[in-house]
Amino acid sequence: MNSSKTAFLFPGQGVQTIGMAKELCDNIPECKEILDRSEEILNMPIKKMMFEGPEEILTATENAQPTILVASLIALKALEINGIEADYAAGLSLGEYAALIYGGALSLEEGLLLIKERGRIMGSALPEGLGKMAAVLKLNDEKIQELLTRAGEFGIVEGANYNCPGQVVISGENKAIDEAVKIAKELGGLGISLKVSGPFHSSLLEPASEEFFNTIKNVDIKELNKVVYSNVKGLPYEKEDDVKELLKRHIRTSVLFEKTINHMIDSGVDTFIEVGPGKALRGFVKKINKSASLLNVEDMDSLKNTIDKIKSNL
């Protein structure tokens, strides 16, 4: 008997591309239904933004978050109607909401409306230009700590996304991030400023997380029927967890993605399916475990490939 375990991974902000999920919607009626229903729930021109752009509209945080979530849910529907399920689910930042919808904690409607509000709040959390993020590559944990300590003398700078060995995204005030990029080079690494509209997953978003809590505290969160991971913990949600409190903290604290993947692997997961646009998450998993089986679904070709691979392993 095959004891292989599968995990669905849902992407975060930054993977948005014009045309995402279009092929799936054009070819699979159930996927088109998800798109139509999402547009209705969100009361936003989701189709137009996803399929036509323009890029600067699609990339704005208040649009990127709901459109990426919709694209991921469309890909998820394509898997579900082909009988492919996962024992485990996780998302990177905003992707956690797709995982929570998959795990039954949030309805489609609740998840979409929460992300619409989250995108709006995070998009307008700080005046533009008052904080940014950078990816730091090729440094070990010790050197990352040294970088944060040294750059911290110039302002707020924090670890935002612990993605995989040799890749950490930092977030904070402009001067501190600029200095961190220089320090990364001195330490033998590489710092790259990211095109995002604010210093996400840092304490600068404390007011945004409080504002978001006003929305989420009224939402009905149901018991999970799958193992779903919390970015804040890097571990699965447990029955006793306060999901609303964790999702509030999620906006202003680090995303522990590498810890999540390691825990999944220790739990016997050997197949990871990136559900939605982009390839970043497969890249992270590959750096964590070279032998993992990596699949994805974002168009008809990748869907067929994934179905073939999964069915051939049964």
Image: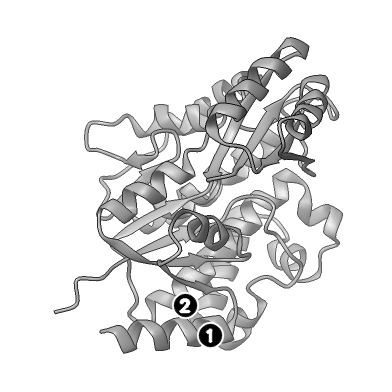
Q: Give the quadrant of residue 239.
A: top left
Sequence order check, earlier mark of 2 and 1: 1
Quadrant in which the N terminus is drawn: bottom left
Residue 244, given in percent of the width and then of the height, sits at 40, 31
Q: Determine the secondary structure under disc 1.
A: loop
Residue 273: % across, % down: 45, 68
The circle on residue 78 is 2
Q: How far from the left and from the top, in percent, is residue 100?
A: 40, 50
The extreme top residue here reads 153
| Residue on which disc 1 sits | 28
Q: Is residue 78 left or right of residue 88?
A: right
Q: Amino acid at mark 1?
A: Ile
- Percent of width and height locating residue 71: 59, 65
Placement of the C terminus among the 4 image quadrants: bottom left
Name the front one of labels 2 and 1.
Answer: 2
**Mark 2 in CB contact with mark 1 (< 8 angstroms):** yes
For this rendering, which residue is in front, 272 or 90?
272
Q: What's under tag 2, amino acid-wise?
A: Ala
Q: Residue at coordinates 65% horizontally, 58% vertically from top-left?
A: 67
The answer to whether residue 106 is visible is no
Against 309, residue 160 (above or below) is above
Residue situated in front as seen by the camera: 200 or 101: 200
**Residue that appears at 65% across and 43% down:** 138
Please tell me which residue is depicted at 46% across the width and 34% down the height of the picture. Answer: 247
Q: Secondary structure at mark 2?
A: helix
